[in-house]
Amino acid sequence: MNGVGFIGAIIIGIFAGWLAEKIMKRDHGLLTNLVVGLVGALLGAFIVSMLGISYGGWIASLVVSTLGAVLLLWLFGLVKRR
């Protein structure tokens, strides 16, 4: 997350995890939302950088983090079904 700082990254992580939880129709707690959001942010940032897209700021970080968190929950759902 470019240019948002440590506290901003935590806030974006919690919100991205919560959004991903609602999009994927799951039910988690605050700590799980934080973990999913932060890991999703890393996953989203990795994918976006591999595509050569640059981003910065709160809104772009939230979008990338949410997309990464949704992808993470989707992948976790695939593994959990087996």
Image: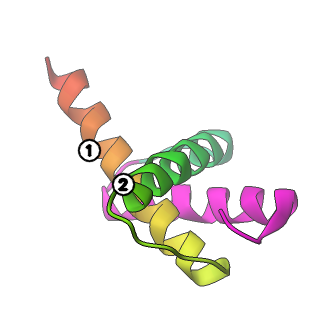
Task: Write down the residue under mark 1.
Answer: 74
Instruction: Give the secondary structure at mark 2.
Output: helix
Cα–Cα gap, marks 2 and 1: 20 Å
Q: Is residue 16 left or right of residue 70?
A: right
Q: Residue at 61% across / 47% down in the picture?
A: 38
Q: Earlier in the sequence, mark 2 or mark 1?
A: 2
The answer to whether residue 70 is above or below residue 12 is above
Q: Which residue is mark 2?
A: 50
* Residue 65, placed above or below residue 31: below
Q: How many marks?
A: 2
Q: Quadrant of the N terminus?
A: bottom right
Amino acid of disc 2: Met
Which stretch is magenta? Answer: 1-26
**Which circle marks residue 5 in the picture?**
none
Q: Residue pushed farthest top? A: 82
Q: Nearer the viewer, residue 79 or 64?
A: 64
